[in-house]
Image (cartoon, helix red, strand yellow):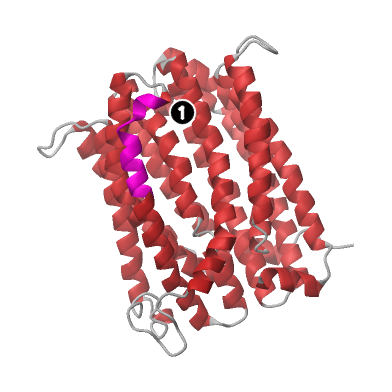
Amino acid sequence: MRAIFSWQEARNFLNIGMPIFIAQLSQTGMNFADTAMTGQYNALDMAAVAVAGSIWAPIALLGIGCLMALPPLTAQMAGAGKREQCAYLLRQGLWITISISSLLMVFFWVVSWHMESFGLDAQMAALGGSYMRALLWGLPGFMFFVNQRSFYEGFSRTRPAMIIGLLGLLLNVPCNYIMIYGKCGLPALGATGCGIASSICYWFMGLAMMFYLRRDKQYVSLRPLFSFFHKRAGELFFDRQLVWRALRIGFPSAIALFFEVSLFAASSILLAPLGTITVAANQIALNFGAILFMVPLAIGMTVTIRVGYCLGAHKVAQARLCAMTGMTLASFFALLICLGAILFREQIAHIYNYDPDVVALAMHLMFYLGAYQLVDALQMIGIGVLRGYNDTRIISLICFAAYWLVGLPIGYILARTNLIVPALGATGFWIAYLVALAFGAACYWLRVRFLHSLPTHEIFARVGR
């Protein structure tokens, strides 16, 4: 009988996963600060940031997701002792960063001038468009940060991203305060100021990571970034095959992220006609849910790193043990988070807003948010395992089926129509989230079980493709 838990792996998860959790929490903390501080400014600006952010998030993650092949590929190279190739992969990742961020900036600029197309009134459309135009300038800086973070994660070094993520959060709060409320002689910019503050922080994080990497003594000989314009023997300035391999593995993950986040974005847009109270309460639940999501995300990312590293070192049994340990830990923490979200739902809602109608609806949604944690944990660990195996195409297919063929139709029917029950508004979409995630989690783990049943030589053949 195969072991399903290892205390040694649990310690590895703590050492690798805790900094990932703090780093991701700091980034989500920026979104939390944006929502909470614009909410305290006024509900209209918060709603504009919520709707514009719902359009921004899935498209931006589509680009950022293309870099998600870099951590497992780097981990596999590191596990095989190929340090030079890790640095080479980082340099080639810069081409993906530059090209994708440039394309997405043009896209967001065009969309920002047509926000009325999403059913927003003129005032909210103007605020949301201005916020998006301010935010888009920070996208290249954040993708640059993610690219460098992937290099460190491949070596199981997750503290640099944690340190810089925390510094970014510390910078974000005063920047928001100055830009949103108009301090230090600047005008009060509301939602627009929130976008400017985020862009400043994204570039700070990207440049700070570059400075950290340059001074890191462990990689001085590799010159992972700073030999970009100095071709080494046997290296290409632009390695089309390696870039294509990274995109071939990363793009399905990006599509999967797009399908997942776009479901939440679509729900926010479809709820917009129901009024500011519904949008604001739903945004509170989504925003706090994004903070809670950092726990399974950190464990899932750690699973990807550990599984990739073990496979690179040809330790298949250890890779399986990592997967099962991750599932056990994620399930335990999900149960604790579920109870906490339900017990402290009123206090959580008051962090964002004091409008009694908004708070009442947000408290109601917290029950569904708590239950959501259990199925979300299972699906995130399943995705993490599949990424460690470079088996990403199936992720995009399952995500599409779960979120767009199952989740979105059920959500729209329950939230906006009377076909099954009287229209439930935001509650209808939260029920749909639960159904979609449960379906996705079951499919991911069926695929993991299939991979674990394969003979060793076939696993290595799949990872090497």
Tell me where residue 193 appears, x and y as whole percent.
24, 37
Per the image, label 1 sits on a secondary structure element best described as helix
Task: Write down the quadrant of residue 245 in the picture.
Answer: bottom right
Q: Which class describes the residues within 10 Å of circle 1: few (<14), some (14-19), or many (20+)?
A: many
Instruction: Classify residue 385 as left or right of residue 425.
Output: right
User: Up-down: is 211 above or below 268?
Assistant: below
Residue 200 visible in image:
yes
Task: Give 5 or 378, whichever is nearer the viewer.
Answer: 378
Task: Write down the quadrant of residue 368 in the picture.
Answer: top right
- At horizontal 42% and vertical 26% (from top left) the residue drawn is 118
Q: Is residue 314 magenta?
A: no
- At horizontal 50% and vertical 16% (from top left) the residue drawn is 360
- Amino acid carrying label 1: it is Gln
Q: Main secondary structure of the magenta part?
A: helix
Looking at the rendering, in which quadrant would you find the N terminus? bottom right
Write down the residue under mark 1: 283
Tell me where residue 44 appears, x and y as whole percent.
32, 21
Q: How many marks?
A: 1
Q: Is residue 112 magenta?
A: yes
Instruction: Classify residue 36 as left or right of residue 270.
Output: left
User: Up-down: is 126 above or below 462?
Assistant: above
Tell me where residue 139 appears, x and y as whole percent.
35, 51
- At horizontal 67% and vertical 65% (from top left) the residue drawn is 307
Tell me where residue 27 appears, x and y as whole percent.
42, 48
Looking at the rendering, in which quadrant would you find the C terminus? bottom right
What segment carries the magenta color? 104-117
The single residue placed furthest to the left in the displayed view is 185
Residue 144 visible in image:
no
The single residue placed furthest to the bottom in the displayed view is 233
